[in-house]
Amino acid sequence: MQSRAERVHIVFSSNEGNNNLIVSLSNGFLYLDVKGIAAHGFDPDKFENAVTQAALKEKGIVRCYTRAELRQLYLGNNSEDSLGRSIAKSVSEDRSGDIALLTAEYSFFSGRTSGTTHGSPYGYDQHVPLLFFGSGMRCGRSIVPCRPNDIAPTLADLLQTPRIPLRDGITLDIAAGHSTASAQALPAGKR
């Protein structure tokens, strides 16, 4: 039996006998052959729409976002769509695919029967441990929510190096000598 990813790729790469108009499906993004679409005389917007409609017929795919939609979400247009904004913040203009496929909660594209990616926009999937240790670190646990975007500014401040300009991200209060109401010291036997 074919996996959902294989079925989606087969459906999308066989548009009216013109193979390979969808180059790949990777990390929830479809990569289109923009030149091939134009060479076959297809209207790019109509092609994207057809692909989106086909994807939405697949069990487990709940929403699709084109590049244009993701740009609008990134700019803050449509503040109601928090999942779309989360996906839009992860898009790299020169490396991301042309259409983002949002799977239902607790599902993702994989060739395996189990696992996780921590790459979905759902809150449960973004809960991963973050561990800092070494000289100058305060011993304890923090219950303050953080994001991957916070790692680079935190490391830059700990290493006393210039920050790299990022879209967003904050310095986590984890160094010794800093006080925070959210950090809980661990008992000596738990260190």
Image (spheres, helix red, strand yellow):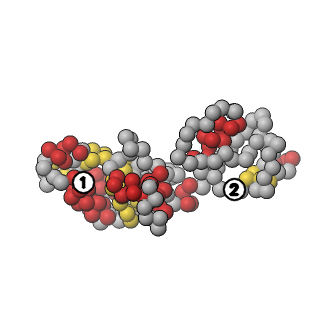
Label 1 sits on a secondary structure element that is: helix
Answer yes or no: is residue 52 visible.
yes
Name the residue: 43% across, 61% down: 77
Q: Residue furthest right?
A: 188
Horizontal arrangement in the rendering, residue 104 relative to residue 37 (left or right): right
Name the residue: 27% across, 63% down: 53
Q: Residue furthest bottom?
A: 80
Q: Amino acid at mark 1?
A: Phe
Q: Position of residue 5 (x, y in %)?
A: 34, 53
Q: Establish if 73 lies above or below 164.
A: below
Dot in front, 1 or 2: 2
Give residue 157's quadrant in the image. Answer: top right
How many residues crowd mark 2 within 10 Å: few (<14), some (14–19), many (20+)?
Answer: few
Give residue 12's quadrant in the image. Answer: bottom left
Q: Position of residue 117 (x, y in %)?
A: 49, 50
Q: Amino acid at mark 2?
A: Val
Q: Position of residue 86 (x, y in %)?
A: 48, 56
Instruction: Find disc 2 in the rendering and name its residue.
Output: 144
Alpha carbon of mark 1 to alpha carbon of mark 2: how far? 42 Å
How many residues crowd mark 1 within 10 Å: few (<14), some (14–19), many (20+)?
Answer: many
Horizontal arrangement in the rendering, residue 49 relative to residue 79 (left or right): left
Name the residue: 32% across, 49% down: 98
Q: Position of residue 27 (x, y in %)?
A: 41, 48
Q: Nearer the viewer, residue 61 or 83?
A: 83
Q: Nearer the viewer, residue 68 or 42?
A: 68
Answer yes or no: is residue 148 visible.
no
Label 2 sits on a secondary structure element that is: loop
Q: Which mark is residue 123?
A: none
Instruction: Find disc 1 in the rendering and name its residue.
Output: 12
Q: Establish if 145 lies above or below 40.
A: below
